[in-house]
């Protein structure tokens, strides 16, 4: 795993460059979440409705497998 990490992130960055990179990635992720908020929320809502944690063997009534 460390090999792959080394390919993604170059070594030898200054402290300031590391902070700038992390800030950029944070702002990029925030902008992406803001732009796609509705789709992300809709997807997460659907994922939550896949099963009941109290009875995980049951499917929602809208699921064809519940018939």
Image (spheres, rainbow, N blue to C red):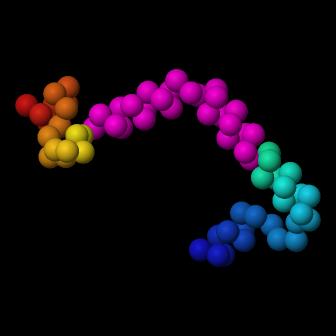
Q: Is residue 12 left or right of residue 4?
A: right
Where is the N terminus found, in terms of image quarters? bottom right
**11 to 61, vertically: above or below:** below
Q: For residue 43, what is the image quadrant?
A: top left
Q: For residue 64, what is the image quadrant?
A: top left
Q: Between residues 62 and 7, which one lies in front from this camera angle?
A: 62
Q: Is residue 3 left or right of residue 21?
A: left
Q: Is residue 36 magenta?
A: yes
How far across and down, in percent of the image, does residue 14 sit? Answer: 91, 65
How far across and down, in percent of the image, does residue 41 sit? Answer: 48, 29
Q: Between residues 62 and 48, which one lies in front from this camera angle?
A: 48
Q: Is residue 12 magenta?
A: no
Q: Is residue 51 left or right of residue 46?
A: left
- Which range is magenta? 25-50
Q: For residue 12, what is the image quadrant?
A: bottom right
Q: Residue furthest front?
A: 54
- Seen at 20% across and 44% down, the residue is 54
């Amino acid at each position: 795993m460390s090999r792959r990490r080394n390919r993604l992130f170059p070594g030898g960055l200054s402290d300031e460059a590391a902070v700038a990179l992390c800030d950029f990635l944070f702002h990029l992720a925030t902008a992406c979440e803001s732009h796609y908020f509705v789709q992300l929320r809709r997807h997460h809502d659907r994922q939550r409705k896949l099963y009941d944690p109290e009875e995980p063997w049951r499917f929602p009534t809208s699921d064809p497998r519940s018939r």
